Image (spheres, rainbow, N blue to C red):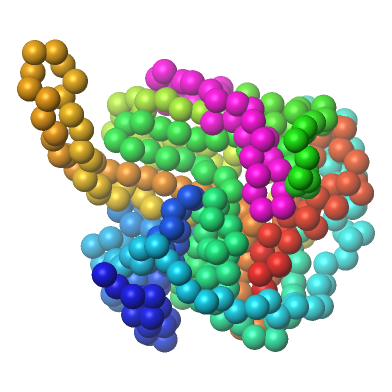
């Protein structure tokens, strides 16, 4: 079994080689895994039949890079335990609150005067760090947010990105699909009764209704669990789990991903109108914030038993492909000793601008608190 020291020594070695690599831990798991690319080539997703770890931007017309399983080494640190570095108190946030408030006011005005129902607007926050170690930052994320999909990604074409996402875009195991509607936010408070106002319920319903309408073309036997309250760090969200069975099609996974991304939780409804508003009014490039990342078509050994009557109850093994993709939320980009953190919120006709700004400040604390 590989030790923590050996595991991170290998990561440090590939870091100095400038080859692509990713460190990650899926929600609820105690292990840390890594794909380390063996060459310095840039591989891009074509039709989602590829196998590897993918990192995709918000804008689906831009390049989606991945680390191929057949061109990388894979290592896993089980029951990961290691020391972490204390936060270094980042400073010099360059984001002006008036800009985001103006953006929210514009969004509300557009919603009230058009057929746009919801739009997600975001801002970038820049901080200067005393020290900057992507590996140490990942360790902090992993230990503080065990229920999130945590990662540290490096690629020469994208630079360093890290995050702790609470939102799964898509899970596919064989033909079984699950996704989630995650919308509505409030600060966590240690109280038994949690009440959600109409604005949050409405925002959540926009996302859920959109997903159900889209998924019926791709899934059979659709079922819902929720809405229920999900805790993500010091925030609470409304969550509805949606499951079904993928219909047979040559490019079923590609079509499903294109239909899902970007979801109303990171874009809005209608998607076309929301994208037009975002592209016209956000004054920066989201790049990989609100994109998606994760394992794509990874071969796994699946053990099952024959459940038919009058047949000997034997265990069987088969290989099936597994896909596990998360929306790139609660994330940051590292450039030398500068950390760029991203945060956004869903705007409806009932939004209150000052509360929306407080919400995005609360969201960046997920990552800022471990810097």
Quarter of the image where one finds residue 284: bottom right
Q: Determine whether, in the image, residue 250 is placed left or right of residue 53.
A: left
Q: Residue at x 20, y 33 (%)?
A: 304
Q: Residue furthest top?
A: 309
Q: Residue at x 62, y 34 (%)?
A: 239
The front one of 286 and 371 is 371
For residue 157, above or below residue 230: below
Q: Residue at x 41, y 32 (%)?
A: 177
Q: Position of residue 127 (x, y in %)?
A: 74, 75
Q: Determine whether, in the image, residue 321 is placed left or right of residue 137.
A: left
Q: Is residue 229 magenta?
A: yes
Q: Is residue 187 visible?
A: yes
For residue 154, above or below residue 296: below
Q: Position of residue 287 (x, y in %)?
A: 60, 61
Q: Position of residue 203 (x, y in %)?
A: 74, 32
Q: Main SS of the magenta segment?
A: strand
Q: Is residue 68 magenta?
A: no
Quarter of the C terminus within the rendering: bottom right
Q: Position of residue 33 (x, y in %)?
A: 38, 63
Q: Is residue 274 visible?
A: no
Q: Determine whether, in the image, residue 10 is placed left or right of residue 328.
A: left
**Range shown magenta:** 212-241
The front one of 106 and 291 is 291
Q: Determine whether, in the image, residue 339 is placed left or right of residue 79.
A: right
Quarter of the N terminus within the rendering: bottom left
Quarter of the image where one finds residue 106: top right
Q: Residue at x 60, y 39 (%)?
A: 263
Quarter of the image where one finds residue 71: bottom left
């Amino acid at each position: 079994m590989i030790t923590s020291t050996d595991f991170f020594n290998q990561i440090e070695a590939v870091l100095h080689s400038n080859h692509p690599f990713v460190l990650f831990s899926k929600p609820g798991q105690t292990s840390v895994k890594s794909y380390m690319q063996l060459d310095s080539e840039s591989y891009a997703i074509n039709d989602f039949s590829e196998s590897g770890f993918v990192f995709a931007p918000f804008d689906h017309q831009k390049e989606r890079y991945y680390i191929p399983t057949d061109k990388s080494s894979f290592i896993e640190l089980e029951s990961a335990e290691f020391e972490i570095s204390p936060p270094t108190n980042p400073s010099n946030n360059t984001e002006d609150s008036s800009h985001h408030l103006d953006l929210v006011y514009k969004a509300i005005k557009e919603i009230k005067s058009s057929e746009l129902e919801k739009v997600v607007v975001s801002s970038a926050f820049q901080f200067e760090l005393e020290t900057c170690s992507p590996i140490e930052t990942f360790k902090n994320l992993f230990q503080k947010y065990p229920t999130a999909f945590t990662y540290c990604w490096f690629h020469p074409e994208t630079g360093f990105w890290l995050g702790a996402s609470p939102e799964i875009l898509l899970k596919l195991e064989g033909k079984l699909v699950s996704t989630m509607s995650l919308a509505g936010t409030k600060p966590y408070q240690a109280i038994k009764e949690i009440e959600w106002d109409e604005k949050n319920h409405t925002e959540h319903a926009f996302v859920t209704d959109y997903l159900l309408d889209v998924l019926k073309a791709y899934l059979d036997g659709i079922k819902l669990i929720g809405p229920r309250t999900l805790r993500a760090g010091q925030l609470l969200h409304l969550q509805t789990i949606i499951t079904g069975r993928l219909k047979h099609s040559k490019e079923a996974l590609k079509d499903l991903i294109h239909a899902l991304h970007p979801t109303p939780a990171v874009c809005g409804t209608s998607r076309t109108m929301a994208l037009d508003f975002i592209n016209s009014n956000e004054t920066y490039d989201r790049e990989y914030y609100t994109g998606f990342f994760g394992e794509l078509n990874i071969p796994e050994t699946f053990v099952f038993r024959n459940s038919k009557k009058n047949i000997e109850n034997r265990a069987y093994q088969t290989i099936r492909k597994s896909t596990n993709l998360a929306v790139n939320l609660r994330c940051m980009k590292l450039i030398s000793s500068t950390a760029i953190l991203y945060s956004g919120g869903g705007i409806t006709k009932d939004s209150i601008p000052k509360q929306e700004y407080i919400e995005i400040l609360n969201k960046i604390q997920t990552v800022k608190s471990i810097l």
